[in-house]
Amino acid sequence: MKEIIAVHGWAGDSNQWSNWEKIFKCCEWEWQATERGYKDISPHTPKWNNNSNKIKLKRVAICHSLGLHLIDKQVLRSATHVILINSFSRFIPSGKENRPIKLALNRMMDAINTPNEASMLRKFHIKAYKPNYIEAASIESNLLNISDLGRVRLENDLKLLINSDSLPIGLNTRANVLIVNSEEDNILANQTKAKLAEDLRKHLEFTPKIINLQDEGHSITKIRNIKKIKQWLEFDHAKNMV
């Protein structure tokens, strides 16, 4: 039994996983995606489909960015594998890099529910996809139809990001963890990436694996890189079956 639950990050939605879902479902993976419901999509928090102890299960949590802090704690606790895509334990670095990041986050917070909201979100999505291209229609779809409740979630989740300072409660210490870092990520500071790896090494029984992608930004877009991540998962599965 092979299951995946994917969790998008701040200001995203479950549609961002469409290519991932196609690639994994064709190889007999059961796929579900969390939806925060910022826009006119109903919020959805999936659970594992099979919790039987009588069969060998592979439960994989794939978290993008803030998704590591948004994932259901019971789902995270029972995940056998965790893939962290440009994720973090503490978003704001504790060193010299933190002042401009704090200022930028405060400006983003101030823009929510004001005439500057759409412009702020547009800039964020363009920055998240750099150096890769994102179609204007895709950007605009993230700016429209934000509901009143969705806007509250958007604000609260940004506060969660700002205040993050450690790994979320519930991460299984025996989980196999893959850290995926994009070398051209314009959202995460290098110190933030290093802090995540350090915290995971202290928390986990097994040293996490790190993959660095040279041609991606904060949001993963290339099919070959999705397949590279899948290969790690399949190799680890075969290794554990020996």
Image: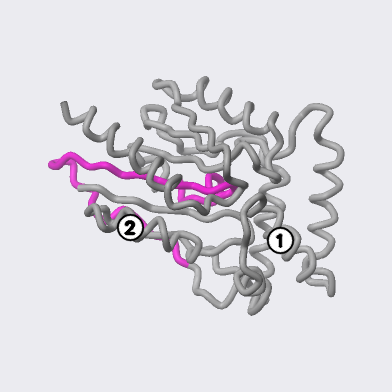
**Residue 120 place in picture, x, y as percent:** 78, 63
The residues bearing labels 2 and 1 have C-alpha atoms spaced at a distance of 28 Å
Mark 2 — residue? 31
Number of residue marks: 2
Residue 22, percent across and down? Answer: 34, 60
Label 2 neighbourhood size at 10 Å, few (<14), some (14-19), many (20+)?
some
Question: Observer-nearest residue: 125 or 160?
Answer: 125
Q: In this view, does 4 lie to the left or right of 135?
A: left
Q: Which mark is residue 155?
A: 1
Rendering quarter of residue 119: bottom right
Residue drawn at x 28%, y 33% as measured from the top left: 235
Q: Which residue is drawn at 65% across and 68% down?
A: 139
Kindly identify the amino acid type of the residue bearing the numbered disc 2. Answer: Trp
Ranked by sequence position, the earlier of labels 2 and 1 is 2
Whether residue 145 sits left or right of residue 55 in the image: it is: right
**In the image shown, does 49 or 128 lie closer to the viewer?**
128
How busy is the neighbourhood of tag 1: few (under 14 within 10 Å), some, or many (20 plus)? many
Query: Which numbered disc covers residue 117?
Result: none
Residue plotted at (45% across, 45% down): 225
Look at the numbered discs 2 and 1 and tell me whether their residues touch, using CB distance below 8 Å: no
Magenta span: helix, strand or loop, mainly? loop
Q: Where is residue 166 in the image (x, y as percent from the top left)?
A: 61, 33
User: Which of these two is toward me, 98 or 17?
Assistant: 17
Please determine whether, in this image, residue 66 is positioned above or below residue 142. Answer: above
Residue drawn at point x = 38 percent, y = 46 percent: 227
| Residue 98 drawn above or below residue 51 | above
Whether the magenta-drawn stretch holds residue 60 is answered as yes
Q: What stretch is highlighted in magenta?
A: 44-73
User: What amino acid does circle 1 point to?
Assistant: Glu
Can you tell which of label 2 and label 1 is closer to the viewer?
2
Given residues 123 and 134, the one toward you in this image is: 134
